[in-house]
Image (cartoon, grey):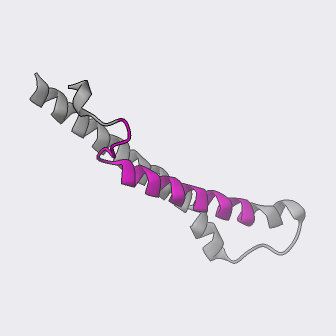
Amino acid sequence: MRDKTQPNSAAAGDGLIRAGAIVFFVGAVATLVTVAPLLLDTTPFPPYMFGLSMLMGVGFLIAGAGVFQSIAQGRRRAREGS
């Protein structure tokens, strides 16, 4: 079965993992931007910036869904192969 799998083929869930990583990093940047004024003792950003910080968790959940989708596909392939 190994000879049928291409090493660079996209598995189920890869798109979700990539999208989750992008959303996570956008949330990480928003978190750094939001926390910086608090540490530098300047005017804090508006409250919606704190909402953007929640994108870290959303991105983590999206990537986790992609991982579980990849696991499910691997189990299906294993059942079909045996």
Q: Is residue 29 left or right of residue 24?
A: right
Task: State the image coordinates of residue 80 (x, y, percent, origin top left).
Answer: 10, 30
**Where 82 sits versus 24, above or below?**
above
Quarter of the image that includes the N terminus? top left
Q: Nearer the viewer, residue 54 or 21?
A: 21
Above or below 42: residue 36: above
Residue with the most extreme top position: 82
In this rendering, the answer to whether 44 lies above or below 9 is: below
Q: Residue at left 22%, top 32%? A: 4
- Return the x and y of residue 66 as percentages of the image width and height: 36, 48
Q: Is residue 52 left or right of residue 70?
A: right
For residue 4, say whether it is visible: yes
Q: Can you see residue 61?
A: no
Query: Which residue is pictured at 59% across the width and 56% down the height?
Result: 25
Residue 47 sits inside the magenta stretch: no
- Judge by depth and name the residue closer to the eye, 71 or 5: 5
Which residue is depicted at the point 23% across and 39% down?
73
Instruction: Give the magenta part as a residue range.
Output: 7-34
Left or right: 16 with respect to 58? left
Q: Nearer the viewer, residue 48 or 27?
A: 27
Image location of residue 62, percent across then percent down:
41, 54
The percent coordinates of residue 65 (x first, y second) are 35, 48
Task: Residue lying at the far bottom in this picture: please name it.
Answer: 46
Asked whether residue 29 is drawn in magenta, I would say yes
Query: Does the magenta stretch mainly form a helix, a strand or a loop?
Result: helix
Quarter of the image where the C terminus is located: top left
State the count of labels.
0
